[in-house]
Every structure is written in structure tokens, then in C-alpha cells.
């Protein structure tokens, strides 16, 4: 029993499994309704229904001739739906956020959404092959399967996805509401602008709005893939750093005698090994410093530079201001009176 427990403890923990986030019922219902609206528009155009007749009425109205003073401004406004300029602007903002937050998720979400946009919208464009209003050949016709590439509107779908990413990545509910309103306003204006200048049918714009919204609603299903991609990129970066830095040499531990650094005054005297390794002499108190100097002066041994003079063991210092006795082996001095 204990061996089984220790075997479980020694086993390496398995990496956590990344599961797809569960979408709320409201989001699923919105996705289903948008998909149904998307298919209904495609079917209405294929059967040349009342929607195609509405397209022709708007086209023959020629809005760009009704309000020509708006044309210069709308020519610049429609750039907000072009993929190149908008992708660069949004990528710069999300790149700054990625640098501040130390994560690649904002940029990876943008790349995933643009990839989905190119695949889905591009495939439908080429598959249906609808011609634009300026290239229409027969009044009242749906102009399908004629080699065109305008159904759905790429400008409109790109505006919904590119600016909607800012709302999708918002960190607070208040910011998400504001950015959602801004995204809806920009994408709505871009779609109507393409109808005004005559580059798209009205049904193209409706399908472009639905296509962009479907991509935004489907992004949570791609979050696990985005997380794995981010982890893989960071792992590759760490491996590249290790290869670039190379193997670091292990520190060498030396238990032998370490060299002794001497002061400059002692280094000039070139002391021997015995002098370096000898135990230090006890330092006398400051009060006996002068007495130690006098004792060494009488014994004839000069004081060693850089050290405190110490009296030899067993030698008693005479009290200060007293007469000294006769030297050993010498004649005694006569005592004279004052």
C-alpha cells in the first residue's frame, strides 16, 4: 500500500488539459440566429427574390450623384474597411498591449480572426462569383456565377472583425460596451459607404455584416488553440535563449588554503610563510602602549613596523617616575641625598 502511494508521488504530474470555453446560451442563440440570417440572404440572392430587386432599385437611384458633396469625405472613410490599413493600426495597438501584459494572446486572436475571415469570406466570394453594380450586364439579374468576387462585401466583414476585436479583447464590461458601439458604428458606416459609391449591392453589405459577426461569435472555440500556440512560442523562445547563451561553467569549489592579501607596508618587508601563518600576538590595551615601547627600547629589539609593540612574557615593567635598582652583575650606585 505504501509503495503505491510513493509511486504516485514520484510520478510526474500530467500537464493540464486545455478545454474549449463553454459559450453561454445567449451567445449560442445569437450565433445560430446570425447563421440563419446568413443562409437566408444567400438563398434570397440565388433565387433572385425581392432582395435582388431592392439591390437594383438602390443601384439605379445612384446615391453618389444625389449627394456629391459627401463623396470626397466618404472616399477616405471607406479606408476604415480596407484590410491592410486597419490591420496595421489594430496590430500596433494590440502589440503594445501584448508588450505591457507580457502575453501574445491579443496578437494571436487578431491573426486567428483575420485568417478565418480570409478563408470563409474568400471562399464564398470565389464560389458564388457575383458581379458588382458597375459590371452588371442585365437589369434585374442576380449576376451570380459570372466570375465576380463581391458577395459578401469584404470591406464590411473586415470592418466588423477588425474593430470588433477591440471589444472582444476588452477587460471590463464598460469598455466592452463602448468598443462594441464604436465597432458597430464603423462597420455600419463602411457598409453603407460602399453602397453609396456603387461598389457593392445592398445584399453584399448585409451578408458582410453577418459574416463578420459569425467570426467574432466563433472565436471562443479557438481559444484553446490560441493558448497552445502561445505556450509553444514561449517554449521555443526559451530554447533559443539557452542555445544562444551556451552552457555556463559550473562554479569550482576550492577547499585548499586561500591566498592572504597583505597591506602595502607589510608587503614591502616580504615576510616569510611562518610570519604570515603565525598566530597574531595579543594587542595590549592603549594605556600600556608607551610602556611597551620603552621596554623594547631597553631590551635592544626595535619595534616591528605595522604592529603594536608588546612586552615579553614574564618581564615586569618598573613603575613610572621611580629610581631603578642596580643592574644584575654590576656595581651598586651610591645613594646621594637631595
Image (cartoon, rainbow, N blue to C red):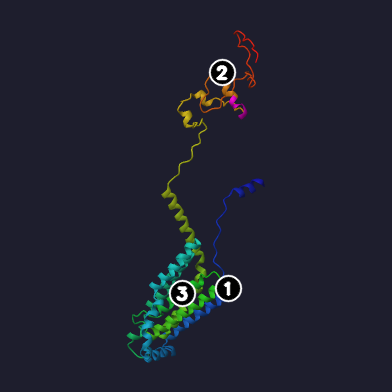
Task: Give the camera-side residue of 286 and 136.
Answer: 286
The residue tagged 1 is 24
Q: Position of residue 90 (x, y in %)?
A: 44, 70
Closer to us: mark 3 or mark 2? 2
* Mark 3 residue element: helix
The magenta span reads 286-290
Q: Considering only order in the chain, which callout, 2 or 3, is on the residue closer to the N terminus?
A: 3
Q: Considering only order in the chain, which callout, 1 or 3, is on the residue closer to the N terminus?
A: 1
Disc 3, disc 1: CB below 8 Å? no
* Mark 1 residue element: loop
- Residue 142 seen in the figure: no
> Is residue 224 shown above or below 279?
below
> Is residue 236 shown above or below 127?
above
Measure the alpha-carbon separation of dots 3 and 2: 100 Å
Q: Magenta segment: does it hold 83?
A: no
Q: Position of residue 18 (x, y in %)?
A: 54, 62
> In screen coordinates, is 312 left or right of 260?
right
Q: Position of residue 50 (x, y in %)?
A: 44, 90
Residue 333, labelled with which disc?
A: none
The residue tagged 3 is 163
The residue tagged 2 is 298
Name the residue: 49% across, 24% down: 273
Name the residue: 46% across, 67% down: 94
Name the residue: 45% across, 79% down: 187
Measure the alpha-carbon separation of dots 3 and 1: 23 Å
Closer to us: mark 1 or mark 2? 2
Amino acid at each position: 500500500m505504501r509503495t503505491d502511494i510513493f509511486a504516485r508521488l514520484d510520478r510526474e504530474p500530467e500537464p493540464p488539459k486545455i478545454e474549449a470555453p463553454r459559450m453561454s446560451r445567449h451567445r449560442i442563440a445569437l450565433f445560430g440566429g446570425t447563421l440563419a440570417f446568413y443562409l437566408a440572404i444567400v438563398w434570397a440572392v440565388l433565387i433572385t427574390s425581392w432582395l435582388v430587386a431592392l439591390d437594383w432599385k438602390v443601384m439605379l437611384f445612384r446615391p453618389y450623384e444625389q449627394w456629391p458633396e459627401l463623396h470626397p469625405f466618404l472616399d477616405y472613410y471607406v479606408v476604415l474597411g480596407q484590410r491592410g490599413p486597419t490591420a496595421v493600426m489594430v496590430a500596433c495597438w494590440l502589440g503594445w498591449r501584448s508588450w505591457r501584459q507580457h502575453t501574445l494572446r491579443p496578437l494571436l486572436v487578431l491573426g486567428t480572426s483575420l485568417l478565418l475571415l480570409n478563408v470563409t469570406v474568400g471562399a464564398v466570394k470565389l464560389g458564388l462569383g457575383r458581379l458588382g453594380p458597375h459590371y452588371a450586364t442585365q437589369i434585374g439579374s442576380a449576376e451570380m456565377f459570372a466570375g465576380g468576387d463581391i458577395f459578401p462585401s469584404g470591406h464590411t466583414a473586415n470592418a466588423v472583425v477588425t474593430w470588433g476585436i477591440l471589444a472582444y479583447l476588452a477587460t471590463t464590461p464598460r469598455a466592452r460596451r463602448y468598443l462594441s458601439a464604436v465597432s458597430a458604428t464603423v462597420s455600419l458606416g463602411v457598409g453603407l459607404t460602399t453602397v453609396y459609391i456603387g461598389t457593392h449591392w445592398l445584399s453584399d453589405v448585409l451578408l458582410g455584416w453577418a459574416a463578420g459577426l459569425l467570426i467574432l461569435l466563433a472565436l471562443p472555440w479557438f481559444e484553446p488553440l490560441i493558448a497552445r500556440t502561445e505556450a509553444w512560442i514561449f517554449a521555443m523562445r526559451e530554447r533559443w535563449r539557452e542555445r544562444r547563451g551556451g552552457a555556463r561553467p559550473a562554479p569550482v569549489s576550492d577547499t585548499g588554503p586561500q591566498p592572504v592579501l597583505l597591506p602595502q607596508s607589510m608587503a614591502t618587508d616580504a615576510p616569510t610563510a611562518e610570519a604570515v601563518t603565525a598566530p597574531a600576538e595579543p594587542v595590549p590595551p592603549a594605556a600600556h602602549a608607551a610602556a611597551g615601547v620603552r621596554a623594547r627600547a631597553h631590551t635592544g629589539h626595535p619595534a616591528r613596523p605595522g604592529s603594536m609593540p608588546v612586552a615579553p612574557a614574564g618581564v615586569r615593567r618598573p613603575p613610572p617616575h621611580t629610581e631603578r635598582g642596580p643592574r644584575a652583575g654590576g656595581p651598586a650606585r651610591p645613594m646621594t641625598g637631595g
